[in-house]
Image (cartoon, rainbow, N blue to C red):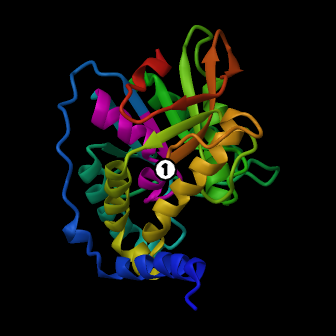
Amino acid sequence: MNDPFLAYVRGFESLLHQGDLLAAADGQAPVLPEVAEHAPVCLVFSPHPDDEAIAGALPWRLRAENGWRVVNVAVTLGSKRERRAQRWRELERCCSFLGFDLLSASGTPGQAFEQVRAFDGSDDLQQRDAQVARVAALIRHYRARVVVCPHGLDGHPAHIGTHALVMAAVQHLAPDWRLHLLFSEYWNTQMAPALMLALEAADVATLVAALSLHIGEVARNPYHLSLPAWFIDAARRGAERVGSAGAPATGITFAALYGWSCWHQGALVPMSGQVAPAGQSIARLFA
């Protein structure tokens, strides 16, 4: 007797193995709207090359659907010095594919910050203060309306450190500055996501294709193939974490979850939970 549940699970397993046949060169670059000279700006502070795709659901929708300028800021290039030149080249290709601008947090292409981790008593205070000042200067220079960075407990030292840099930098902004802070998750989920962002299958395919361009990383671990499952799980969690406990399923297949606060009148204001369906403009959320 055939077990339909076993067949169902093996279907997932088979699909994952089929991903081995996908090649980075097979990805078809999306057709994107032009970015107007004074388009709103979303800054993405990426702890590593690849986070621009992993955490890129919101920036991607702003770029593809609303014509925003998205600038990916490479905070580090990873811990392996011998891989950094290649990782920068892969990052250039990924950002080009997604229509994102790219710059290094250090201001020098191919170089980035060092020792990005949670603040503690062993920090080089001069280096840390310079990094915070640089992040604040970038936010001011681009007059960013949205900043994306990892949440504060994202389970990796560089992710936690990137969050700390951004949060310290925000304190340097003028009190009348208004800025939306969106906190992504990957190595650890967050306790209180406030935005459930729906994704179409085509959006997910674009992000998987973009992530596959980090050839050296996915050769080590083909984590790009599990990205759809990550978005499926986020749709499950979002129904009750952004919605309410015991709420029914939303009918959304793929979603990304973000924490959300707004810097307004010199203080961080938590935003109320929102579900952003596919096919509806999300720019209105960040007016």
Q: Where is residue 51 in the image (x, y as percent from the top left)?
A: 48, 55
> Does residue 191 appear left or right of residue 139 in this picture?
right
Is residue 114 shown above or below 147? below
The kind of secondary structure element at disc 1 is loop
Q: For residue 191, what is the image quadrant?
A: top right
Q: Give the range drawn in magenta.
A: 43-66
**Along the line of sight, which residue is nearer the eye, 98 or 179?**
98
Confirm whether the magenta stretch covers residue 51.
yes
- Identified at 41% across, 36% down, the residue is 278
**Along the line of sight, which residue is nearer the eye, 93 or 260?**
260
**Along the line of sight, which residue is nearer the eye, 219 or 162?**
219
Q: For residue 15, what is the image quadrant?
A: bottom left
**Along the line of sight, which residue is nearer the eye, 218 or 72?**
218
- Identified at 43% across, 82% down, the residue is 14
- Residue holding disc 1: 253
Count neighbours of disc 1 (C-alpha within 10 A) and say few if under 14, some if 14 to 19, many if 20 or more. Answer: some
